Amino acid sequence: MNNPANQRPGESCDSFVEVQSKHLMQCWGAQRGYAPVGVTRTEGCWIHTTDGRKVFDLRSAHECNNLGFCHPKVLAAMREQMEKVVYVTDDFATAPTAELARTLAQITPGDDNKRVWFAQSGAGAVEAALKAARFYKYRQMTERGRDNLAPEMHYPYPYKIISRYRSWHGSSTGALSVGGDPRRWFAEPMTVPGVLHAPDAYCYRCPFGRTYPDCSIECAEYIDQMIELEGGSNKVAAVIVEPVVGSNGIIPPPPEYFPRLREICDAWDVVLIVDETMTGLGRTGKMFAIEHYGIVPDIMVMGKALGVYCPLAATVFSRKISETFDDCAFAHGQSFSGHALGCAAALASLKVIEEDNLLDQVVEKGRYLGQRLEQLCRAHKSIGDVRGLGLFWTLELIKDPKTRESFRKHTQKYARTVVTDIAEFLLQKKNIYIPADKFGIWVVPPLVVTREEIDYLVDAIDEGLSLADRQMA
Ligand SMILES: Cc1ncc(COP(=O)(O)O)c(C=O)c1O
């Protein structure tokens, strides 16, 4: 250890790994025992560590890193933008902010007469969506005139939000409250009132005990009933959903689910918010996952991969919602909203997606990955289900094929299970990083993953799964 007396300001006598473990408040974990791995540099799908290893990032940096680390075209666009404008308030216009807003209005489903608000996190963008949906419904009610309303409709206004149990929308209070993920339990009862959770469109464990396709999509019909029993259009403001559930199990719904949900929301005039934070920007083989289902949301949220290497998220409002604010303040905002540097990075990434035909590549590589994972499923009795779209896959592990009992119950999100063992095996023996806290084995590589890398990953997971096979009932 150096003598601290000889230290220059800003220079530490500890390694940055020790400093980080001592001073950084680690997310979603106890601080004692926090032991981050030191990183010297990153490239493509790989993280180079201070102990000389090269680790494949199979969770794509919290699913932000679609293009691979350090994409030269994005870095060049960022360098160029940094020399001009990094950030000014929205009393000023900048070329990247304007262009990105227009581009998102054009490439999201629906006509291009939309408005976009920029946040720095998915949670921030979700908060804007919830607030705008409630304002929209409030305006509707006040425009009708309180005197023309039934007495039970006078107070407070359509404020209820319907979400689903298996969902995650971020960790700020509003976003956390609409999420159904166990992480909300740490915040209860200080969550926002008026949130109701619907059962999930989860065919492998259908909450209604039905089997697709003979199920009449009861998971969607149930939401129709919920809206009615919760006071209909006069009490319910919005339904918020992930197009493919992410954190809570990578669950694509059946094809009929979203068309039916759209009909239900239209019939009740309830706002449909689609949260593409994890699934947007090509992850599932379409620019936005909701395009697989052919519907147009009223509000779309995106984040993570949008800003590539910059914290950037967006809430995209259809004209129906944005016109609420034509003559009434959009009472929301954040420092750094519309950050020009982040917007320039996002525009560069959209260009790469187009120039490199990345969406087609994701479809092709995703098909190959899916086939290889199906083969694993046949070889390992501990795999209950293989699900995914594009390059967004999971292997759901079970203890017992008859009962489908899971290795990790919903109440055991942070319990040590065989998923933790497999994650440790992959990191220590195969230099592959996957999240240890998920309900299954995540296979979510950067979209630039190669076929050879897919083979390496799947072979390694194959070995890791013997740990689960051995622990079966
Ligand atoms: C669907 C979804 N929405 C919102 C969020 C929150 O995003 P952020 O962590 O950027 O606040 C996440 C994060 O995982 C997410 O998966």
Image (cartoon, grey):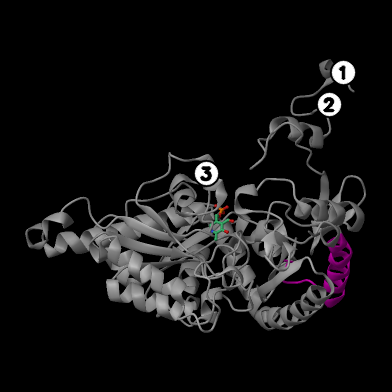
Q: Secondary structure at mark 3?
A: helix
Residue 447 is inside the magenta segment: yes
Q: Secondary structure at mark 2?
A: loop
Residue 385's disc is none
Residue 350 place in picture, x, y as percent: 61, 72
Residue occupying image coordinates x 77% and y 32% = 19
Distance from disc 1 to disc 2, alpha carbons, whole Å, reads 8 Å
* Residue 322 visible in rendering: no
Q: Is residue 228 above or below residue 171?
A: below
First in sequence: mark 3 vs mark 2:
2
- Corner quadrant of residue 139: bottom left
- Corner quadrant of residue 91: bottom left
Which residue ends up furthest to the left in the rendered image?
Answer: 147
Q: Which residues are magenta?
A: 444-466
Residue 325 place in picture, x, y as percent: 28, 61
* Residue 294 visible in rendering: yes
Neighbor class of circle 2 (other Cα within 10 Å; few <14, some 14-19, many 20+) is some
Along the line of sight, which residue is nearer the eye, 240 or 383? Answer: 383
| Residue on which the image places disc 3 | 185
Give the main secondary structure of the magenta stretch.
helix
Discs 1, 2 touching: Cβ within 8 Å: yes
> Between tags 3 and 2, which lies in front?
3
Residue occupying image coordinates x 80% and y 32% = 18
| Residue on which the image places disc 1 | 3
Identify the image quadrant of the N terminus.
top right
| Residue on which the image places disc 2 | 13
> Between tags 1 and 3, which lies in front?
3
Along the line of sight, which residue is nearer the eye, 307 or 256? Answer: 256
Q: Secondary structure at mark 1?
A: loop
